Amino acid sequence: MDMEQKILITELTRGKDLAKQLSNNLNPSSSSLETHQHLIQKIISSYEKALSMLHCDASLKPNTTPRTEVSYQPCKDINKKRKTMPQRTEHVKVGWTPEDGYCWRKYGQKDILGANFPRAYYRCTHRHAQGCLATKQVQKSDSDPTIFEVTYRGRHTCNQNSHLALASNSSKDNKIGKELHVKTEESIIFPSFSFAHESIGLEIMEDDLFLDMGSFSPSFRSPATSESNYLSKSPCHMMNEFGHGQSHNVQAPESELTADIISTPTSVNNSPFGDFDFSLAKEDLDTNFLFDYLDTCS
DNA sequence: AGGATTTGACCCTC
DNA sequence: GAGGGTCAAATCCT
C-alpha cells in the first residue's frame, strides 16, 4: 500500500472517529455548540482531504469520452414499501441484462402496472448458504427499452469473490482484460473493468452511499431471444461465458443516455481492460469496500 | 439429479 | 381492494 493510500485511510478513519466524538457530544448536557461546530469542521476537513485525494474530477480526463456515467440521487419512495433496506438503481444503457459480478438467483417476475416490461426479482445465490440478503430488481425502461433499470436492495454479506474471479479468469485466457486494476493515477483509487467493444451508461440512484463491489464489476450477457425471459439467466453463467471469450459489439451513444442522469463526474481512463471504463462520483466510495478491495489487491 | 427459471398464488402495505 | 414483493411447485436445463 503506498503512502497516498495510507494517508487516505488515515483521513477517512479520522473522519469516522470525529463523527463518533460528535455523536457522543450531541448529548446536549455534555458539550457546547462550539464543540459541535469544531468537530464538524474537523470532520469536513478530514473528508475533504480524503476526497481531494480521490480527485474525482472529470476534468482530469480531458480526452476521455465517458461511456459509463454514474450518478446518485435519493430514491424518493423507496422506504414507503415493505422493505426498508437501502436501495440504489442503475440504469444500464445496453440491450442486455447487466451482470454485476455477483451470483443471483431469480425468484420472481411480475408485470408492473403502467410499465411496458415485466420486473424480474433476483436474490443472492448465497442467501441460504450464507444468509446474504442482497436482492435486486431488473426492469426494462419504458422510455428506452435499451435501458435496464436495476435496483439493488441490501448489502451482500456473503463471501463472494466472483467479481475478482472474473478478472482473474479472464486474465488467464486474455479474452476480456489483463487483470483487476486499482487505478491510483490522479488519486483515483478504483478498479476498472472493461470488455472489448462494449460501452454502457449507468445511472445509479441511492438513498445511502454504500457501494457494493458487485455493482462495479460489470459484465454482460448475450441478448435474450424472447421478451418474456430476457431477464432470466443466472449471471454466474455469463461469467463462464465471458470467461470463454464471448464478446459483444454494442455501442451506446452518449446522446441516448437518459436525460435525467444528474452528473457525469469522472471517467477512469486507460483501463487495462480496454474500452469499458467505470467512473464514479466521489460520493460513491464506501470506505469499507475500498479498503477491503485494496487489501485484496495488494 | 441437482440447480435454475417460470409462474400462479399468496402476503404485505397503502 | 390494488399493487408490488415473495413463495413454492412445476418445469426446464445442464
Image (cartoon, coloured by chain):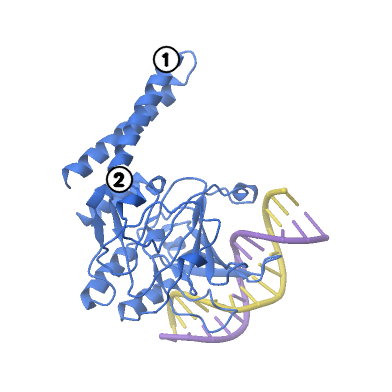
Chain colours: A blue, B yellow, C purple
Q: Nearer the viewer, residue B3 or A250?
A: A250
Q: Nearer the viewer, residue A54 or A63?
A: A63
When asked about the image quadrant of residue A9, the answer is top left
| Amino acid type of the residue tagged 2 in the rendering | Leu
Q: Which residue is mark 2?
A: A54
CA distance for labels 1 and 2 = 30 Å
Q: Foreground mark, 1 or 2? A: 2
Residue shown at 53%/68% (left/top)? A147
- Dot label at residue A34: 1
Expressed as whole percent of the image width and height from the top left, the position of residue A92 reads 48, 65
When asked about the image quadrant of residue A235, the answer is bottom left
Q: Earlier in the sequence, mark 1 or mark 2?
A: 1
Q: Nearer the viewer, residue B14 or A277?
A: A277
Expressed as whole percent of the image width and height from the top left, the position of residue A166 reads 31, 69
| Amino acid type of the residue tagged 1 in the rendering | Glu
Residue shown at 63%/49% (left/top)? A77
Disc 2 crowd rating (10 Å Cα; few below 14, some 14-19, many 20+) is: many
